[in-house]
Amino acid sequence: MLRSYFDHNATTPISEAALAALTACLRDAPGNASSIHRFGQEAKQRLEQARRQVAAAAQAKPDQVIFTGGGTEANNLAIFGSLRAGKRHVVTTAVEHPAVLSPARELDVTVVGVDGQGLVDPDEIRRAIRPETALISVMSVNNELGTIQPLALVHAVAREYGVPLHTDAVQALGKTAIYPAELVTLSAHKVYGPQGIGALIARVPVRKVTFGGHHERDRRPGTENVAGAVAFGAACMDLSAVGPELRDQLEREILRRIPRTRVNGAGAPRVANTANVLFEGIEGEPLVIGLDLRGFAVSSGSACSSGAVEPSHVLTAIGLSREDARSCLRFSLGRANTEAEVLALVDALEPVVARLRKLSPAYV
């Protein structure tokens, strides 16, 4: 069975260029980048070249790039590394990734709501700021909806109060311009690089939150993942974006051929590869399984916790009921997807949705 992948916001397949860079580095530069001998210095040179490549992709300076073990670690470093004496309050939004919401909830946090399109109101951010606010964290692009937050307006508020802005830009890199916030999170495996490597762009000082060494300019201790960083750099050299044509065609065909469906976040600025669709009357998880059996990989926003399927916090934040939030699928396209795959996906969706609705007591 031919399989088609429509889950690129979860992770992307590694590109040939990134894979070649990764394997070449593992083979040819086995040294520790902190060592002063020739093997170590070769590794160091490759690491610094990767740093320059990632910096260029984010329109930053190389010395502002802190390599991490991924986007989650970078978010934690941004949040906890921004705390100062008497300043332990964080402002964030209800649609952030758990990699921001979870560490923020370990602190004094104000979670600001969003509108029906998933966008935050900068005035709500303003009202949430307090004298003890250490950081404002607003994502660049939502991982479920694809909506683009008004970061320039949020940043203007942050600057007015002298509070640094952090943005989780994991879903923005390679899809839209990276906003130059004081702190920016990036991840390699969202841009056809390997898993297990990310970066925090730090235009302001951050305190390290783990201890044991003086790596990364004394901001993130631990022997650097040189090969991962090199592959990340290679991926950043080829950030060809997916155009909106296939996403738009997918949405049009679903809305035309399958009744009682709608696109979440369609009225907001969105990146071109993401579609989040509500299929009334059925659960998303069986729909994911039904499509997988037909060779298509997609995702729902639901999470399984203690045996219970919980609705997406993003979808309930934009006003969907718990029932409707459990009835949504996310389709995230990549640069290898084709028109033929999109049409085949809709061909598969139509009978799967019809069959599940027949079995669903919620669909009347």
Image (cartoon, rainbow, N blue to C red):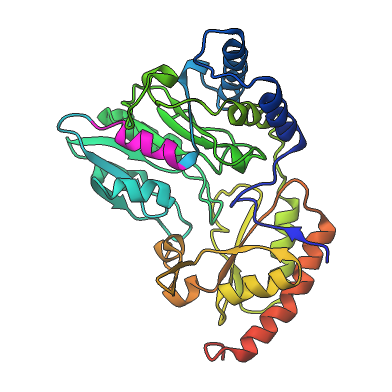
Q: Is residue 103 above or below residue 35?
A: below
Q: Position of residue 123 (x, y in %)?
A: 31, 45
Q: Is residue 8 left or right of residue 112?
A: right
Please report the residue visible at 67 percent of the width from the left and 24 percent of the height from the top: 25
Q: Which residues are magenta?
A: 72-83
Please report the residue visible at 54 percent of the width from the left and 53 percent of the height from the top: 268
Q: Is residue 99 above or below residue 182?
A: below
Kindly give the residue lying farthest to the top in the view shown. Answer: 37
Q: Is residue 287 above or below residue 214?
A: below
Q: Is residue 283 left or right of residue 348?
A: left
Q: Position of residue 305 (x, y in %)?
A: 41, 68
Name the magenta segment's main secondary structure: helix
Question: On the rendered image, what quadrant is the N terminus found in?
Answer: bottom right
Q: Is residue 46 left or right of residue 180?
A: right
Question: On the rendered image, what quadrant is the C terminus found in?
Answer: bottom right
Magenta span contains residue 79: yes
Q: Tell me where residue 358 sits by quadrant.
A: bottom right
Q: Is residue 335 above or below residue 294?
A: above
